[in-house]
Image (cartoon, helix red, strand yellow):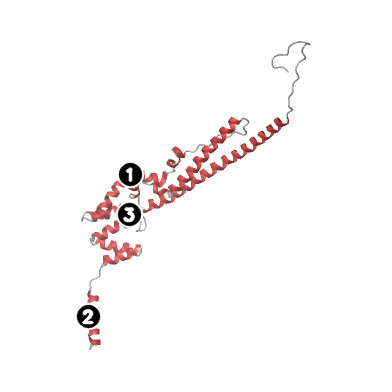
Amino acid sequence: MKRLLLAACLVACSLACSAAPADPLADANALFASKAYPQALAAYTKLANAGNVEAQQQLGQMYWYGEAGAVDEAKAEAWFRKAAAKGNAVAIASLEVMKQRTTRRAEIAHWVEHYQGEDLKTGQFDCKAPRIPAISKQSEEIARVSAAVTKWQDCYNGYVSHLNAASPLTKRIPADIAKLMNLAETTRANERLALVQENLAEEARVGAKLILADLAAWRSATEAYVKEHNAIVAASPSVKLYDFDRPIGAAPRPGAQ
């Protein structure tokens, strides 16, 4: 009897489940969540054309982020406007973002196309190369060159630490600009800023190598001169002078023996 009741329940449940209405929007959302974008696009388009507000909003986002195959701001705006007209909050907020993009396009382009890291090399991190002569023969000049090199070295090491701390450079993009970028712009900015950081580091490394080469040549020439000069001074004869004879009976000159 229990088996018959269980079987009857299973049949009833099966009939109830088969009679449950399908949820096309949930199916479309599931396709999107699994990153089946072409299938999700087709499902959302069918629903959006039928007037489904959430599908219209989702279509706008897919065209906005390039998940529909490529970024298409015109289509994104069109679908956002349809959904916003029916009170969709996400679509309304997205249209506001698109409006801000128009007014701040130059700032977006700065980070995507033009930023060179100029702000990282200013002020205390503007490390001027020290003037290093071919040779120094005076102690005052040796002291000046040594002090200039030490000052540059401290600046260079500070710049290296500063650049490392700034990594990744995408942190320098203002938050209110970053939120206005679409997926393609964000990707390009990430790639560009990574290249900018590598170029800044390589520029500093090359400059440092040139300065160290000049320093090594100056030190070698200066030490050789100092060594030769000291040897000449050490080999010079000691000087002893005789006093002139004085007449007999004359008093000795002051200081004379």
Residue 225: x and y in percent read 66, 34
Judging from the image, what secondary structure is the residue with disc 3 in? helix
Query: Circle 1 sits in a helix, a strand or a loop, which is it?
Result: loop
Amino acid type at circle 2 is Ala
Residue 147 spot, x, y in % from top left: 54, 35
For label 2, the residue is 12
Q: Answer above or below: position of 132 versus 20.
A: above
Task: Name the amino acid type tagged 1.
Answer: Arg
Q: Amino acid at mark 3?
A: Trp
> Is 225 left, or right, of 61 in this rendering?
right
- In the figure, residue 216 lies in which quadrant? top right
Q: Which of labels 3 and 2 is toward the front? A: 2
Q: Nearer the viewer, residue 186 or 130?
A: 130
Q: In the picture shown, does residue 70 fall above or below 161?
A: below
What residue occupies the far bottom of the structure in this picture?
1
Look at the image and tell me in which quarter the N terminus lies.
Answer: bottom left
Write the residue at 26% across / 65% down: 25
Report if the CB atoms under discs 2 and 1 are less than 8 Å apart.
Answer: no
Instruction: Choose the circle earlier in sequence order: 1 or 3.
Output: 3
Residue marked by disc 3: 64
The residue carrying pointer 3 sits among few (fewer than 14), some (14 to 19) or many (20 or more) residues within 10 Å by Cα, namely: many
Where residue 40 appears, as percent x and y from the top left, is 32, 63
Alpha carbon distance from label 2 to label 1: 61 Å
> Which comes sooner in the sequence, label 2 or label 1?
2
Secondary structure of the residue carrying tag 2 is helix
23 sits left or right of 177 in the view = left
Residue 140 place in picture, x, y as percent: 58, 30
CA gap, disc 3 to disc 2? 46 Å
Residues 116 and 144: in front is: 144
Task: Sort mark 1 into few (<14), some (14-19) or many (20+) by Cα contacts within 10 Å.
Answer: few
User: Are the residues at dot 3 and dot 2 in contact (C-beta closer than 8 Å)?
Assistant: no
The residue beneath circle 1 is: 104
